[in-house]
Image (cartoon, helix red, strand yellow):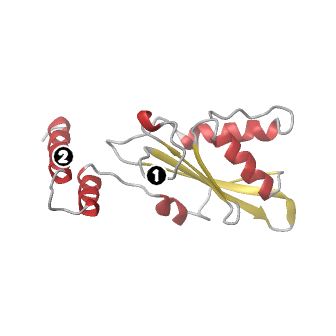
């Protein structure tokens, strides 16, 4: 079966499942998620915490969380900081929802940055970056793992001298 035919079958099945009137909303959403091969979740990203790779910066963790959030806001508006957990995450939306800054599940790619203290050095932190794509039919445009590290490096280098401009 060709990829185009497989995609058509999957799409038709998803539309059929989504239009079943007797099904609950949760069942319809689950059917669409499974039939369109959607994958990835914030829970899956969170489960990768501590697995690295790590990058160390000469910035305290609290300040690093703010810096990472500011950098992420240059790419998307859906950025969420969790300072007590030491994490910042962002969701790339479908183009029609690009300016959506709520936690809604309609995302195409996501990134979660964990900020850890460096043992014995309160003036430094280490970060790890983990990413996810929603699925083959819902792929995002941002390559977080490639684009984010140099942006963070640049923000650290110019910290306090050049303001970081967010999208919104």
> Real-space Cα distance between discs 1 and 2?
21 Å
Residue under the image location 70 percent in, 66 percent down: 84
Quadrant holding the C terminus:
top right
Q: Is residue 86 left or right of residue 3?
A: right
The x and y percentages for residue 120 are 86, 68
Q: Is residue 168 visible?
A: yes
Q: Quadrant of residue 73?
A: top right
Q: Is residue 168 above or below residue 113?
A: above
- Mark 2 lies on a secondary structure that is helix
* Left or right: where 57 falls relative to 102: right
Residue at x-position 43% and y-position 33%: 95
Q: Which quarter of the rendered picture does the N terminus lie within?
A: top left
Check disc 1 and report the residue beneath it: 104
The local crowd at label 1, few if under 14, some if 14 to 19, many if 20 or more residues have their Cα within 10 Å, is: few
Q: Dot 2 corresponds to which residue? A: 15
Residue 19 against residue 143 in the figure, above or below: below
Estimate the x, y position of residue 152 in percent, counting from the top left: 71, 41
Secondary structure under the numbered disc 1 in the rendered image:
loop
Local packing at callout 2 (Cα closer than 10 Å; few below 14, some 14-19, many 20+) is some
Is residue 71 shown left or right of residue 98?
A: right
Q: Residue furthest front?
A: 21
Along the line of sight, the residue nearer the viewer: 54 or 117: 117
Q: Position of residue 36 (x, y in %)?
A: 26, 48
The disc label shown at residue 72, or none = none
Instruction: Name the quadrant containing residue 162.
Output: top right
Q: How many marks?
A: 2
- Percent from the top left, x then y, of residue 102? 52, 49
């Amino acid at each position: 079966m060709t990829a185009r035919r497989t995609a058509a079958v999957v799409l038709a099945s998803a539309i059929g499942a989504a239009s079943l009137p007797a099904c609950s909303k949760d069942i319809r959403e689950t059917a669409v998620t499974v039939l369109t091969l959607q994958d990835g979740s914030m829970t899956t990203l969170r489960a990768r915490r501590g697995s690295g790779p790590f990058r160390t910066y000469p910035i305290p963790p609290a300040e690093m969380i703010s810096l990472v959030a500011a950098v992420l806001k240059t790419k998307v508006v859906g950025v969420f900081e969790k300072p007590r957990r030491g994490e910042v995450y962002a969701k790339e939306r479908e183009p029609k929802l690009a300016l959506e800054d709520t936690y809604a599940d309609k995302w195409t790619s996501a990134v979660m940055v964990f900020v850890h203290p460096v043992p014995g050095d309160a003036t430094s932190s280490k970060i790890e970056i983990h990413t996810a794509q929603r699925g083959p039919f819902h792929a995002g445009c941002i390559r977080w793992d490639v684009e984010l590290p140099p942006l963070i490096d640049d923000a650290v280098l110019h910290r306090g001298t050049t303001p970081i401009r967010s999208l919104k």
